[in-house]
Image: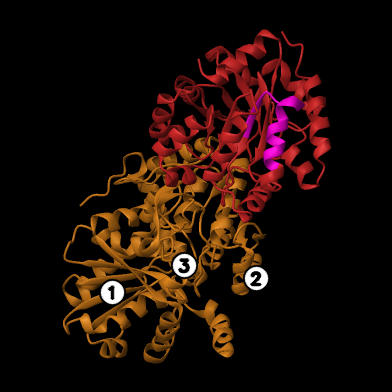
Chain colours: A orange, B red
Amino acid sequence: MRAKTAKGRFGRFGGCFVPETLMPALTELARAYYRFSRQKDFKEELASLLRRYAGRPTPLFLAERFSRFIGCEVYLKREDLAFTGAHKINNTLGQALLARWCHKKRLIAETGAGQHGVATATVAALFGMKCSIYMGELDWQRQHLNVVRMKLLGAEVIPVRSGSKTLKDAINETMRDWIASFPYTHYVFGTVAGPHPYPLIVRNFQAVIGREAKRQILEQAGRLPDYLVACVGGGSNSLGLFHPFRRHREVRFIGVEAAGRGLASGFHAATLCRGRPGVLHGSFSYVLQDKNGQIASTHSVSAGLDYPGVGPEHSYYREIGRASYTAVTDSEALRAFHLLCEKEGIIPALESAHALAWVIKNRRRFRKRDIVIVNLSGRGDKDVAEVAKIEGKE
Amino acid sequence: MSTIAEQFSRLRSRHQRGLITYLTAGFPDRNTSLRLMENVEKWGTDLLEIGVPFSDPIADGPVIQQTSQVALAQGMNLGLVFQHCQHLAGHLSIPYLLMTYYNPVYQYGLKNFARDCRKTGVSGIIVPDLSLEESEPLRSLLREQNIDLIQFVTPFTPLARMKRIVRLASGFLYVVSVAGVTGERKSFDPLLIKCLKQLRNLTRLPLAVGFGVSTPEQIKYLAPHVDAVIIGSYFLRRLADGKIEEVEKSMANFKVFLTNHE
């Protein structure tokens, strides 16, 4: 199967719904991406940076004690071991390199959990570029350590106080910055959402996860997996894992969203499970919204999943049935967080714990020979204080 | 000829530039908002742009963001805006337009939207996040109802794209003065005048400049090159401070610089 990418469409999803003021920037970006990303020099430079700076390839690890608990073979794709502690670096290195090839002097980005902000600030320092990161005030409080990290790396971190004070508002603010600054600034969009060409660019830079995983599972298990499981906020770690397997129909894709306090509670971020198609941040995709089309406030224990939109390619996968989307609650994710700590000595990010929680919850459905790859998209050091706080209260 | 085109030809025959006033529907509250809209014609407005509040207005600066949030908190929505329009049909002889982001329109249903615009006398629609590439479904439905879908041009729009925009545009062209969002500013990019001259050579469509227009000096500077100016944040900030009478006074002030132009 092939996702149609003409005019930035995935089936009927995607597109470019942005103010005219942004069109010159996006047109320039699309043109530069198509031109440079195919060149041998660009590819080699990126591959070298990923290997020598970001520490790729990341291991594919058979989690034996966790597997025994589940009752099938569970492999973890260790994106938590990529430099800066999450898969985000794959995308920021790619985009920063693209920005450098376009002679941009400044990088800007939104951030939710702070991981994408840190990964952007990191590459800005590496390339000697100026950097401004927009972060919702609520996330600023939940992920304060990442604010400190970004500042250490020389970035200016700007708190966003409008709207719900989370990721979606940080994106609005970064877009406003870019509208005024694009001649010398590149906007490092953090996920597979947003206007064309971002869903395509980010997915392709993240697809290194799936390419490695495919090679590694063939080496280690001698066959393709039965399930790929990943959390979905905007959807970049999941698409990065899924994309290289898309033509292998026997490999099932499971995207796990944040059910927050429960899908019925209204406090969740399960866009594909509970949203409707609409337009947010430049693309036509599933959106959590009220009946008047106003964007909903979301809730999740994990800042990285706390987003009312989702990448248009996921909406397409949902519509054609290529992937199944489901959601787990805050408390299910927290249980999975503890279980992985205890069984494997790995502290997962709360985002990634959602994917693990789905595997735990569905352990009866697996046969003993089944192979499941879970994308361990980030490490949980950033969440330790938040978890302690939540559990101290209870 | 559309209502908007008629209004501009009237202005041209009187050697006048138009004043387009932007007001957020439901701000500062629903009643005051409606009363303001009834009065703007009397105060000198030539076209009224009614802002449908949206939770995530990416093309707008802090003033319109703030007024939108206040309006939303009071339960403003597209259906209520149409009720306002229905009421205004009996009070205004100037054209009124809706400025709305795309998602509320999409959720309302494009067909229902076009139908209700027609029913309530709306003459034009401005959708800041609907790029030319994505605009055809809405434009064709509006065209059936003789309603203009207003297109944007910026000083950074390349000539080839300008030509494409001009071909599809009707009513007037919304020329964005700066690379940025709505809100008041001291000066304009010199590219703006170049862009306006380019557009004059390309089309007979009226040109209206918006984003950052707030002083008589700016209006004086722009007037020889445009058919209208669009002012929003300036008025809204005064409303936010509770100074309705200043809105009235400043409109009269701006008008002075918009009259007597060949």
Find residue A291 and report its horizontal and vertical position in percent. Answer: 46, 54
Is residue A58 shown above or below B50? below
* Disc nearest the viewer among 1 and 3: 3
Please, is residue B104 above or below residue A252 in the view? above
Q: Which mark is residue A373?
A: 1
Q: Quadrant of residue B231?
A: top right
Percent across and percent down for residue A339 are 39, 88
Would you call the spot at circle 2 few (<14 residues within 10 Å), some (14-19), or many (20 or more)? Answer: some
Residue assigned mark 3: A305
- What range is drawn magenta here? B33-49
Name the residue at 23% across, 49% down.
Answer: A2
Q: Is residue B41 magenta?
A: yes
Q: Is B30 positioned to the left or the right of A191 in the image?
A: right
Give yes or no for contact between labels 3 and 2 (Cβ–Cβ under 8 Å): no
The chain carrying label 3 is: A
A152 left or right of A265?
right
Mark 3 and mark 2, same subunit? yes
| Res. A148 mark | 2
Mark 1: secondary structure = strand
Q: Nearer the viewer, residue B71 or A146?
A: B71
At which x and y percent is residue B98?
Answer: 56, 35
In terms of secondary structure, what is the magenta stretch mainly?
Answer: helix
Marks 2 & 1 on one chain: yes
Image vertical order of residue A99 relative to residue A375, above or below = above
Instruction: Looking at the image, tell me whether mark 2 or mark 1 is earlier in sequence order.
Output: 2
Q: Is residue A167 above or below residue B130?
A: below
Of pointers 1 and 3, the one earlier in the residue sequence? 3
Kindly check if marks 1 and 3 are in contact, taking CB atoms under 8 A apart as contact.
no
For disc 1, the chain is: A
Instruction: Using the image as rendered, state which of residue B69 and residue A377 is in the foreground.
Output: B69
- Give the x, y percent position of residue A287: 43, 56
